[in-house]
Amino acid sequence: MERILPSYPLFIKDPNFSIWMGTELLNDNDVETWYGEKKKIYGFLKTNGETYYFMGDGKVFAPFGIKKAEQTKLNVTAFATEYEFACGKTTLKIRFVSPLPLTDLDLLSMPTCYMEYEIVGDKTAEISLFVNRNLCYNNVPETFDKRVRGIVVPMDGFETASFGLLRQMPLSPSADFGGADWGYYYLAGEEAWVLDENELKGYLANGYRAFVADSDEKYIGAINKGTKGAIVVAYDDRVSIDYYGDFRKGYYLEKHTIFDALTDTWRNRAKIEEKLQAFESDLLAKAEPYGQAYKNVLFASLRQSVGAHKLVRDTKDELLWLSKECGSNGCIATVDVSYPSMPLYLLYNPELVKGMMRPILDFARMPVWKYDFAPHDAGTYPVCGGQVYGVSEEKNKYLARLHEGHLFSTFKSHYPFYILPESFDLYDFNMQMPVEECANMLIMFLAVYQKDGDIDFFAGNKDLCEKWVQYLVQYGLKPGNQLCTDDFAGHLENNINLAIKATVGIGAYAELLKANGDKESAKYRKIAEEFAAEITRFGADKAHLPLTWDTGEETFSLKYNFAFDRVLGLGLFDKKVFAKEIECYLSKAEKYGTPLDSRKMYTKSDWLTWVARLTDDIEMRKKFVVALDEFLKSSPDRVPFSDWYEGQTGEYHGFRARTTQGACFMLLL
């Protein structure tokens, strides 16, 4: 079976409802969460007197006469992963669909996915899906009560089975590599059941159906007959986000119930498919000039990026589009994650970009954030409790008393930092990203304004923006020894790529002032032009711009921050500068892309698509895209699309399933 992706999305809705398969064959292994925890979800087809397993590692059922279906096809589209199987003389076609259209917020946030099927060759076949209780919790720690309760609810024309932990732990854990230890999972089909493992074996072996689920090893199951249909999977988290002390439900469940969602999906699947197909057709038309490789990159990115968010509303009825920084530290609403993610959301729904920014704007006005630069994050998902990056345990003797063990220990929640007074010395300045985050926010403000024409969003936050632009004017051209979004590479003094970002940020602010009727626009435009001119002069006698102001052209780095100078039409830098950069990057390209900079051989997929935007030559852009497609098809690690990996070998560095892959849509802006 030819490989398409390193890992295949099956059921994707949000960071806690995210199921993947890390092999081409759907029935060679168990499915797993985005962070790699195995879950027991099994699919079976009873046909012509035989039972076949088509999903999950069903070898455990072989002693009961269960056969392995032969997978014959695999395909990936924008919202679906598709398979075909031979089950004796019967053909089974299935599609795992995650409805995530950014243009329909109700459907985007409706917490349902479905497995659609078609059976050819047996009109009496019976298809089933069974989910083990281990979907309801994290496998660690091993000490808490993992018993679940279940219920079957008759609906209008179908049934639904549900289970969840006896002991619900809402909004726990607040950590990175983990899921939710709260909420209820649902399966909907023509028949639905709660059963235990022995009863499942009895059903598979001889059709046994007198389920009482006496043992703790419980499953929920859905069984359908007929040649076409679907089984619906849903997750009701009951409460989604702690937003600075306000517990918020998901956008859809704020005004509907989970049974509304199940019913809508069951009855209106054809209408859902129409919406998804319309979205995909538009996407394919936009991507057509770049060929199949780019389409594959976009298909790999779309569900992953969207599914790393949760959509809620705040108490002012404004949208919050809250990301989880999957695989890098679990932060929520991280500015330098929102910045690379932005192209996808600008393209289809700029209101979601505002939803990324609001948590940062709200926290920046709280007393504990006493700095004149923008925050890095708003907490750790699913809790907006105040920035956690760069909190100083070492210098703060009071803070250590609030925690048992290390501040960032796995599966421990943080103190609500946002309530602390201004006098509390919470953060280590050396671990902040002041130039990075100030410029990111200003660029995002202009990007959404250019898309929706609403200057009021900026005007209502001009006081913060004014502080942030002043920081860039003072420190942006030759940044001190500080971190940027590529913090894994460590501190860097006089980072030219960061200086470029500061320049674009100041230029963006000037445009915002102009749109707001402010006479100071010309002043900041002049500063941005002066910064750009100095950067350009520095590189004029060099083959390309070096890594820093203090190094020569023996060094280089991907100057991805040039991209929004082009996208926003600022015109601060000449295309000749971009041409020299592109020539440099292509000359240093490895199998899976050009290294991030001259210090290491690793690269970043998000920034590769951004530097591709610096040229108008589509064939040159394709060279960057082809490297990404090659990474998807042959890199060694079978994890959801990583954005940080070795350019030569493709080995990844821990980042997985991150929303940053929204960056791959940059070429469509």
Image (spheres, rainbow, N blue to C red):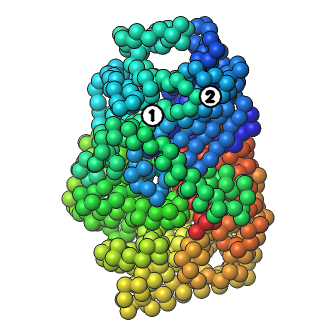
Question: Residue 347 got which mark?
Answer: none
Distance in Å between CA atoms under marks 1 and 2: 20 Å
Residue density around tag 1, few if under 14, some if 14–19, many if 20 or more, within 10 Å: many
**Quarter of the view holding residue 524:** bottom left
x 59%, y 71%: residue = 563
Q: Nearer the viewer, mark 1 or mark 2?
A: 2
Instruction: Report if residue 590 is visible in the image.
Output: yes
Q: Position of residue 158 (x, y in %)?
A: 40, 29
**Quarter of the view holding residue 474:** bottom left
Camera-side residue: 269 or 579? 269
Name the side, left or right, on which 166 lies relative to 492.
Answer: left
Instruction: Report if residue 137 is visible in the image.
Output: no
Name the side, left or right, on which 477 lies relative to 389.
Answer: right
Q: Amino acid at mark 1?
A: Val
Q: Position of residue 312 (x, y in %)?
A: 34, 52
Camera-side residue: 526 or 93? 93
Q: What secondary structure is found at the residue carrying circle 2?
A: strand
x 72%, y 39%: residue = 3
Q: What secondary structure is found at the residue carrying circle 1?
A: strand
x 25%, y 42%: residue = 401
Q: Position of residue 138 (x, y in %)?
A: 42, 30
Which residue is disc 1 drawn over? 233
Q: Amino acid at mark 2?
A: Ile
Camera-side residue: 424 or 583? 583
Position above or below: 620 against 198: below
Question: Residue 119 got which mark?
Answer: 2
Which residue is farthest front?
123
Q: Position of residue 485 (x, y in %)?
A: 51, 60
x 42%, y 77%: residue = 453
Quadrant where the C terminus is found in the figure: bottom right
